[in-house]
Amino acid sequence: MLEQENLTQTINRPLEAGYNYFVSAAIIAAKLDQATHIAKQLSLTASNARAVALRAGERAAGFRPLTDFIDRLAEITISSSKKINFLAAILSKTAVTKIRADNAIKHFNLVFEKAHKSPFINSLDKVFEQCKEKQQYLDIQYKRQIGELSEELDMLSSELRNAVILATLSRVEASQAGVEYQDALINVANNVESAASEIKDYIKYSQQIVLTLQ
Amino acid sequence: MKTHKLFENNSHTWIMFGRDDEKPEQIIDSNQYMVVSKNNALLMDPGGIELFSSMLAAVIKQVPAEKITHLFASHQDPDIISSLGLWDQALPCATLHSPWIWESFIRHFGMESITYDAIADVGGEIKLDNVLLEFIPAHYLHSSGNFNVYDSEAKILMTGDIGAALESIDAPLFVDDFDQHIASMKMFHQRWMPSNSAKNDWVNRVRKLDVEMLCPQHGRIFKGDDVKRFLDWFEALEVGLIEKK
C-alpha cells in the first residue's frame, strides 16, 4: 500500500524542469528498473496461476492458456525494460560527454573573448574546430538515442494495453472455476491489472521525461 | 589573471600566473608557473576548472597553444589539476607528468588524449629542448605522492603547497617581510602537512640545491635570503597539528 502511495506521489509530482539531460536519462533508467521488478512479480503470478488452474482441473481449462499470455507479457516487459535501461544508460553517458563538450566550447569562447588581442590566439582555431565537430557528432548521437528510447517506450506501452484485455478474460474464466478456486484466480487477474497499471505509470512518466529531452 | 616573468636567459623563461581577480570568491587563489624553451613549454599545476579560461587566455598571450607540450601536476588536488578534462581538449598532444600513485585518480578528471607520464617515487627529470628540469620528491608535503620542479640553471624550485600562504587576492607576489609572513603560512603548514620526518627529509634534500627562488602554489614567492629563512623556519616547525580552539 505504502509502495503504491509512493509511486502515485512520484508519478503525480510535476517533472522537475531543471534536470540536466544526463540526470533525466538516469531517472528513466531507474524507473524502468522498478518496472522490471514488477514484471518479475508478474512472472511469479503467472506461475502461481498455472498451479491453481492445474489444481482446479477441467473447471479452469480456459484459464490455463491465459497464464501463458501473462508469462509472455512479463517476459516482454522484462526484456523491453532491460533494453530501455540500457538505452537510457547510453543516453546518460552521451549526455554527460555532450555537457563536457558544450562546457569546453563555452570555455574556449571565453578565452577568445579574453585573449582576442593575443598574437597566438589563432593557435586555438584547430582544437576549437575539433571541439565543435565533436559537439555536433554528440548532438546527432544524442538525438538518435532519444529516438530509439522513445520508440522502445512506445512499443512497451502498446504491449501493455493487452494487459487490460488479459485481466478481463482472466476474470471471466475465474468466475467459471468454481467457488474453491475463484478467489485465487480473480486475485491473479487483479495482480495482472495492477502490475500493468504500475508499469504503465512508469512508462508514462519516462515518456514525459523523454519529451523534455527532445 | 596577472602574469609575471620570473627568469629569462638565452635558453628559457619562467613565467608565473596568479592573483586572478575574476575567480569566484570562495575558491582559493593559486599560482601557476610555465617554463618556455625554444620549441616547448611546460605548464605547472595548471589549476582548477574555474580557472581554466582565465589561465588559457593568459597562457595564449605568451605562447601558441601547440607549444605547450608538457603539463605537470605536483599532486592530485582539484586546485592543481581538476581542469585536466579541458586541457585535454585544448592540448591533445601534450604529456602530463605526475606522481605514479595518482594516475588512476587523476584520470577521473577526464583524460582521453593527453599522455600520462608517471613519475616514480624517487623522482625524475624532463628536458625541454636543452633545459633540464628535475622532479624532486616532496612526498607527504602534503600529498602522499608529491613532487617539486627544480631548475638548476634558473635556480628556481617550484614547491607546490610547500611555502604556501592563505592570502588575499591583492597580496604582493614576493615575500617582503618574512617574520610578518609567518602568520599567513603557519596554520597552513601545521594543518595540511602530516609528517615531521617527511618535512625534515625534504628540508635536507632542498638544502643541497642552489635555490634563488622558492615558488609555492599559493601566496608569495620566497627570494634570496628568504629561501634559507623559510627552510630554517619550516625545519623548526612542528607539523601534523590541529589547532585547539
Image (spheres, helix red, strand yellow):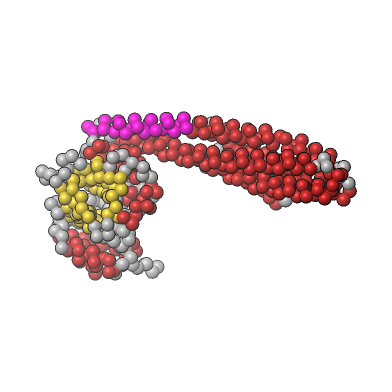
Residue located at (29% from left, 47% from top): B96
Q: Is residue A136 visible?
A: yes
In the drawing, does residue B184 fall left or right of residue A137?
Answer: left
Identify the magenta region: A119-141
Tell me if residue A121 is in the magenta stretch: yes
**Residue A9 pos. (x, y %):** 66, 45
**Residue B126 pos. (x, y %):** 20, 50
Asked which quadrant contains residue A73, the reply is top right
User: Which residue is situated farthest in the left direction here?
Assistant: B10
Against B214, residue A139 (above or below) is above
Q: Is residue B160 visible?
A: no
Predominant secondary structure in magenta? helix
Residue located at (39% from left, 33% from top): A134
* Viewer-nearest residue: B67 or B124: B124
**Residue B241 pos. (x, y %):** 35, 68
* Viewer-nearest residue: A137 or B33: A137
Name the quadrant of the C terminus of chain B: bottom left
Against A132, residue A78 (above or below) is below
Residue located at (31% from left, 55% from top): B100
User: Which residue is situated farthest in the right direction here?
Assistant: A179
Name the quadrant of the N terminus of chain B: top left
Tell me if residue B107 is in the magenta stretch: no
* Viewer-nearest residue: A89 or B10: A89
In the drawing, does residue B13 fall left or right of residue B18?
Answer: left
In the drawing, does residue A205 fall left or right of residue B173?
Answer: right
Residue located at (70% from left, 51% from top): A2
**Residue B127 pos. (x, y %):** 18, 48
